[in-house]
């Protein structure tokens, strides 16, 4: 049953990608595809599935251990599922934010942002190293709270299924109330942007309320089109380069580290951090942009 559902979900996603590409090619909707980028994203997804299957025991075992030592037993009532949906989405926000603010997890997550295109195939560009470095561990507290591993993994799947359709330019905006509560293509386009205004914003999964509450929300500005990608884009479509380029860059930096403090910072501080303060982090890039904006002379009044 599970394998059958997985098959149909995969077929549905591939069909949606093909349909979006076809409609975009004929100008029916806004969608841009290049075959090399699309195949790179699909290859990343294939590798992600293979690695996740190989390491499934690690993640499930960790959740099972926590559930065996749970403080409560939530059961599987409707109320329990609703509570789990909220807690799962908040947990996703925490995981996602750490994955942008800590280089160790950014190295596993950066591949998802490496495409300079934004379409449904971008959603397929997933990590090969996330499970191995523990990006599933923020969900451990949910098992301690008494949600079964099966419930947690099911809710993760539902949340990620929702996020698939966010990776499109075909949809501009929804009604204001929907945009205020839920993550939408407009909000997620911001998340995939490399513009200083948009960097490291909108971490939510299905809900955008966490970003509004914790100060990481940025709305899409029609006067500043989104530039997709990362600060220093990857020039290769090789999935192995996409999957491991940041790990390789980290290893190169660590070879030149002069102290344990620098080693710690290069691994666990923000991407771009340097011991001499000259690194290009999100904070420094945004500060430079804000300074430039303040120094732009005002236009004379007519």
Image (cartoon, helix red, strand yellow):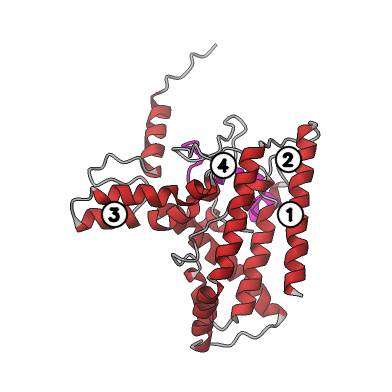
Quadrant of the image containing the C terminus: top right
- N-terminal of the two: label 2 or label 4? 4
Q: Nearer the viewer, mark 1 or mark 2?
A: 1
Crowding around mark 3 (Cα neighbors within 10 Å: few <14, some 14 to 19, many 20+) is many
Q: Pinpoint residue 46: horizontal percent, then vertical percent.
A: 62, 57
Relative vertical location of residue 102 with respect to residue 75 in this rendering, above or below: above
Q: Which residue is mark 1?
A: 13
Residue for point 67% across, 76% down: 81
Residue for point 57% across, 59% down: 48
Q: CA distance from mark 1 to mark 2?
A: 16 Å
Q: Nearer the viewer, mark 2 or mark 4?
A: 4
Residue 189 lies in the magenta-colored region:
yes
Quadrant of the image containing the N terminus: bottom right
Crowding around mark 1 (Cα neighbors within 10 Å: few <14, some 14 to 19, many 20+) is some
Q: Which residues are magenta?
A: 178-201
- N-terminal of the two: label 4 or label 1? 1
Q: Element under label 1? A: helix
Residue 190 lies in the magenta-colored region:
yes
Q: CA distance from mark 2 to mark 4?
A: 17 Å
Q: Element under label 3? A: helix
Q: Which residue is mark 3?
A: 265
Q: Element under label 4? A: loop
- N-terminal of the two: label 2 or label 3? 2
Q: Which residue is mark 4?
A: 115
Q: Nearer the viewer, mark 3 or mark 4?
A: 4
Q: Is residue 13 left or right of residue 242?
A: right
Q: CA distance from mark 2 to mark 3?
A: 40 Å
Q: Pinpoint residue 121: horizontal percent, then vertical percent.
A: 66, 47
* Contact? badges 1 and 3 (CB < 8 Å): no
- N-terminal of the two: label 1 or label 3? 1
Q: Which residue is mark 2?
A: 170
């Amino acid at each position: 049953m599970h394998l059958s559902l997985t098959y149909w979900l995969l077929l549905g996603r591939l069909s949606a990608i093909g349909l979006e590409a076809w409609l975009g090619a004929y100008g029916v909707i806004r969608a841009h595809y290049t075959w090399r980028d699309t195949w790179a994203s699909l290859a990343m997804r294939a590798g992600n599935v293979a690695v996740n299957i190989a390491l499934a025991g690690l993640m499930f075992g960790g959740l099972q251990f926590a559930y065996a030592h749970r403080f409560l037993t939530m059961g599987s009532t409707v109320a329990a599922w609703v509570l789990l949906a909220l807690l799962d989405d908040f947990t996703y926000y925490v995981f996602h934010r750490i994955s942008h603010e800590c280089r160790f997890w950014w190295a596993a997550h950066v591949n998802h942002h490496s495409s300079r295109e934004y379409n449904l195939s971008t959603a397929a560009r997933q990590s090969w190293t996330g499970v191995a470095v523990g990006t599933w561990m923020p969900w451990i507290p949910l098992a301690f709270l008494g949600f079964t591993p099966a419930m947690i993994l099911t809710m993760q799947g539902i949340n990620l299924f929702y996020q698939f359709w966010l990776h499109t330019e075909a949809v501009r905006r929804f009604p204001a109330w929907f945009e205020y509560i839920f993550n939408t293509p407009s909000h997620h386009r911001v998340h995939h942007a490399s513009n200083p205004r948009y960097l490291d914003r909108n971490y939510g999964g299905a809900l955008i309320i966490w970003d509004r509450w914790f100060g990481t929300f940025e709305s899409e500005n029609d006067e500043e089109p989104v530039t997709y990608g990362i600060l220093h884009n990857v020039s290769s479509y090789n999935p192995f380069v996409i999957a491991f380029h940041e790990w390789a860059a980290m290893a190169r930096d660590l070879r030149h580290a002069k102290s344990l403090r620098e080693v710690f910072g290069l691994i666990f501080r923000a991407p771009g951090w340097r011991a001499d303060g000259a690194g290009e982090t999100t904070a420094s890039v945004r500060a430079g942009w804000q300074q430039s904006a303040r120094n732009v002379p005002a236009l004379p009044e007519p």
